[in-house]
Image (cartoon, rainbow, N blue to C red):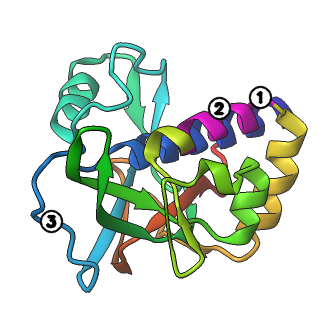
C-alpha cells in the first residue's frame, strides 16, 4: 500500500512537472500573452492500466487523447477524488539574455514551503521582482526530479502540504474531473482516495 501511494504521489508530481513545463517558449517578441486577471481550470483524467510510455511529457492534450483512445490497456476510473492546492504564481516577463534583448519568458514563483521542499536557492531564480523569486520550468523540473528521488521525504512533505488542499469532484464514468474559476498559477494536484 505504501509503495502504491508513493508511486501515485510521484506520478501526480511528475504530472505537475509536465504542467510546469508547458507554456510559451522563450521568444524575442515583446508581446505578452498571459492575462493574469483571467481565471482558469484544471481537468484530470484517471485511467487504470499500463502507463503510456510512448507519450512525451510535453505532449499536447490532443496527442495524449489520441494515445489514450488507441490504447486497449487503459480503462477510465470513476469515483476517484483528487486534491489541488495553489503553490505559486505565473509571470510573463522580458529579460535580456546573451545577445538577445527582451526575450519573453515564463517564470513561476512558489510559496515558502514548496521552495524549501524543492531546495530552491536565490541562485536558482531566473528573475526577482520586489523580493519575489521566479523560476524557469526547467529549474523546477530539475529540482522536482531530485526531490522525487527521496521517497519518505515525498510522502511526508506532500501529505503535510496537501492538508491545506481543496478537492475536485469525484471522477465521472469517463475518469474525468474538473475544477473551474481558479486564479492562474502553479498548482499541486494529487490523488486523494485510491481505487481498491
Label 2 with label 1: CB-CB less than 8 Å? yes
Decide which of 86, 124 is in the foreground and name it. Answer: 124
- Within 10 Å of the Cα at label 2, are there few (<14), some (14-19), or many (20+) other Cα atoms? some
Location of the N terminus (image quadrant): top right
Residue 137 shows in this picture: yes
Left/right of residue 45 with respect to residue 114 in the rendered view = left
Decide which of 155, 153 is in the foreground and name it. Answer: 153
- Relative image position of residue 27 (x, y in whole percent): 17, 45
From the viewer's perspective, is residue 61 above or below residue 48? below
Q: Tell me the residue at 28%/79% (across/down).
A: 36
- Relative image position of residue 129 (x, y in whole percent): 48, 75
The Cα atoms of the two marked residues, 3 and 2, are separated by 29 Å
Residue 147 magenta-highlighted: yes
- Mark closest to the chain's N terminus, 3 or 2: 3
Question: Which is closer to the viewer, label 3 or label 2?
Answer: 3
Q: Name the residue under label 1.
A: 149
Left/right of residue 179 with respect to residue 87 in the rendered view = left
Left/right of residue 136 with respect to residue 153 in the rendered view = left
Question: Which is closer to the viewer, label 1 or label 3?
Answer: 3
Q: Mark 2 points at which residue?
A: 145
Q: Mark 3 points at which residue?
A: 33
Q: What element carries label 1?
A: loop
- Mark closest to the chain's N terminus, 1 or 3: 3
Q: Give the range drawn in magenta.
A: 140-149
- Relative image position of residue 166 (x, y in whole percent): 59, 76
Amino acid at each position: 500500500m505504501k509503495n502504491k501511494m508513493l508511486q501515485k504521489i510521484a506520478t501526480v508530481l511528475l504530472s505537475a512537472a509536465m504542467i510546469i513545463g508547458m507554456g510559451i517558449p522563450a521568444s524575442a517578441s515583446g508581446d505578452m500573452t498571459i492575462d493574469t486577471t483571467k481565471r482558469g481550470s484544471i481537468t484530470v483524467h484517471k485511467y487504470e492500466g499500463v502507463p503510456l510510455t510512448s507519450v512525451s511529457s510535453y505532449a499536447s492534450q490532443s496527442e495524449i487523447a489520441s494515445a489514450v483512445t488507441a490504447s486497449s490497456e487503459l480503462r477510465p476510473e470513476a469515483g476517484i477524488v483528487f486534491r489541488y492546492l495553489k503553490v505559486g504564481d505565473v509571470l510573463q516577463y522580458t529579460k535580456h539574455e546573451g545577445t538577445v534583448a527582451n526575450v519573453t519568458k515564463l517564470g513561476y514563483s512558489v510559496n515558502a514551503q514548496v521552495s524549501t521542499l524543492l531546495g530552491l536557492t536565490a541562485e536558482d531564480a531566473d528573475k526577482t521582482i520586489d523580493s519575489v523569486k521566479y523560476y524557469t520550468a526547467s529549474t523546477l523540473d530539475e529540482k522536482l526530479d531530485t526531490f522525487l528521488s527521496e521517497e519518505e521525504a515525498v510522502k511526508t512533505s506532500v501529505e503535510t502540504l496537501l492538508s491545506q488542499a481543496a478537492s475536485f469532484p469525484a471522477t465521472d464514468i469517463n475518469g474525468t474531473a474538473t475544477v473551474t474559476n481558479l486564479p492562474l498559477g502553479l498548482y499541486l494536484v494529487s490523488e486523494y482516495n485510491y481505487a481498491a
